[in-house]
Amino acid sequence: MSKCFRPLRCAAWIGTLCVLSLAVVEPAHAVEEIHDMLWFPRDFTAPHAIDGSGVFVSFEGRITEADLQNGLTFSIAAQDADGGRAVVLPVANAFDNPPTVGTLVTAGFTFQIECNPLTGLLNARIANGGFSFCHPDDGALVQVFDSVDHVASVVISDPFGFVILDEHGEAAPNPTPTNGFTCGVGLRMSAPTKEQTIDVVSLRKSRELDRILEDGDSGTIGVYFDAEGTQCTGTITPDQPGRIYIIANTNGLTGCGVAAAEFRFEGIPDSWVTVSAPNPEMLTIGDPFGDGVTCAFPCAQPENGKYLLYTVVVFATEEEDDLEFSLEMRNFSGSPAFNCPQLLMCDTPYFTKLCVETIPCYVNTNAPKSCAIPVSVTKDTWSSLKALYR
């Protein structure tokens, strides 16, 4: 029998040559610029038998005007080696809190496929998963996909693969192989193991790091003499205690908010005394003036792009001049391979770690200095970090 996908009315003519041309007959689909596809299973040395098991897929795309009107909309299509293609699962999920046009959305979900080996009819549904995006007012948001069931009016007569289609019916890059699945006898699909899940997440994080190289600045952590994060020089003497602020400045990949920060404070003279108060919204582990601290907080977009981490009162017991208060990597870090101060992105469920630049403040100096970033995180640094995700 020739390779083809056939409309439902062909199903009664099993054994008869199917001469109807294949076309995508579903309405236009909305999310566009789909990229960074990841699939599980990933071993396609032989076709996998469709037996009701789940196929995991993750991708990114851009929100269009149609998405805002009709919900996040895309489709999963089956395709064969001859270029035949048909939609097996159209998805349209309304936004609880819509973003703006052009917003990057990350989707990850498992869809289950059942196949009738006699007729070849496919029944597909989203089993679980969701999508995340950055809302202009509310920061990083995550929404669960609604349950979707769909009986595809196609008959599959040969091994086939899956592909995501965008608004214009254009296939996204990196589909599964066209001989990856079959309604007949094949490899048994199973839920991903812990190691396989880590592998998929690692691939996603590696691609996030590629974007860091493209976008540049992804936020900073700084020490300031004002709560607004603008003054980096000040005076602290025995008769004039000082108040300083440790602030995370979001930008680039952290522009939608951060989930955690990790650092260690340096530069306080041994004889001086500090009294620190963490932001009450944070959960903290460690001591910023000892081996360092890890701070975790809700994924919300901070006001004016700044998130107050600590307020610190500093008491000088003796005169000291030309001091520099700086932030370094935490000792005994929860991520020892990252030898740097860190911010964690709100890219649920990955929470990608970022090495970030730090901004020091200067105490009792005769030459006031600006809040400049002294050392950049270089591309060489990121290239070495990328090896951690391979």
Image (cartoon, grey):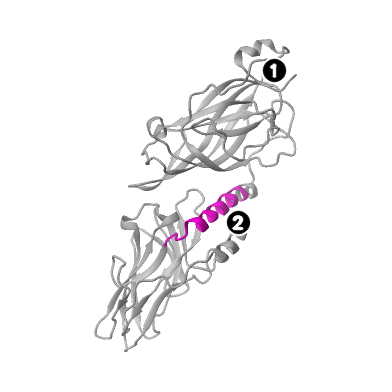
Q: Is residue 291 magenta?
A: no
Decide which of 233, 41 is in the foreground and name it.
233
Label 1 is placed on what type of residue?
A: Leu
- x 71%, y 34%: residue: 188
User: Would you name the residue on which mark 1 appears?
Assistant: 118
The quadrant where residue 297 appears: bottom left
> In the displayed structure, would residue 46 be above or below residue 322?
above
- Left or right placement of residue 232 versus residue 121 in this view: left
The percent coordinates of residue 81 (x first, y second) are 69, 30
Q: Specify start and end residues of the magenta stretch as a single range.
A: 199-219
- Report if the CB atoms under discs 1 and 2 are less than 8 Å apart: no
What is the quadrant of the C terminus in the image? bottom right
Residue 7 at x, y = what percent? 61, 17
Q: Quadrant of residue 236?
A: bottom left
Q: Residue at x 48, y 27 (%)?
A: 28
Q: Which residue is mark 2?
A: 389
At x 59%, y 59%, the residue is 386
Q: Amino acid at mark 2?
A: Tyr
